[in-house]
Amino acid sequence: MQSTTQNCFRALADPTRRDIVRILAQSDMSIAQLTGRFDMTRAAVKKHLTVLSDGGLITVEARGRERINHLNPAGLAPMLSWLEYFDTFWNDKLSGLKAAIEKDTE
């Protein structure tokens, strides 16, 4: 079974899915509304939405016969936590480089 972090990275690995996340950050939309924004079939958009849902990045609400897709910003938390390690790593490395450069210029 894949971890939540892996599912999140997998979901965002595809440019179309990243575009869907950007669109849903602006407004909730049905599958039909999203399909109108892409040059692909409804079935293809649905597959992308399934991967995003599996990654915890969107939630789906049934409204009658429609399914409304919502961005789930909390779904990004596992990925952001994983990336924080590298932020600290690079800050430490860049601070050391800055100190070395400043020492050479004195």
Image: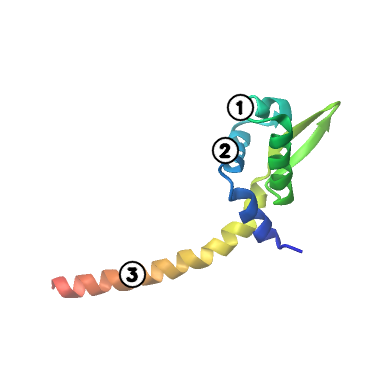
Q: Quadrant of residue 97?
A: bottom left
x 74%, y 34%: residue = 43
Q: Position of residue 69 (x, y in %)?
A: 72, 35
x 37%, y 71%: residue = 93
Q: Quadrant of the N terminus?
A: bottom right
x 71%, y 47%: residue = 51
What residue type is disc 1 on?
Answer: Arg
Who comes first in sequence, dot 3 or dot 2?
2
On residue 19, which mark appears? 2
x 58%, y 43%: residue = 18
What residue type is disc 3 on?
Answer: Ser
Residue denoted by label 3: 95
Q: Are marks 1 and 2 in contact (CB under 8 Å)?
A: yes
Q: Position of residue 106 (x, y in %)?
A: 13, 73
Q: Position of residue 68 (x, y in %)?
A: 75, 32
Residue denoted by label 1: 37
Where disc 1 sits, the SS reads loop
Left or right of 80? Residue 42 is: right
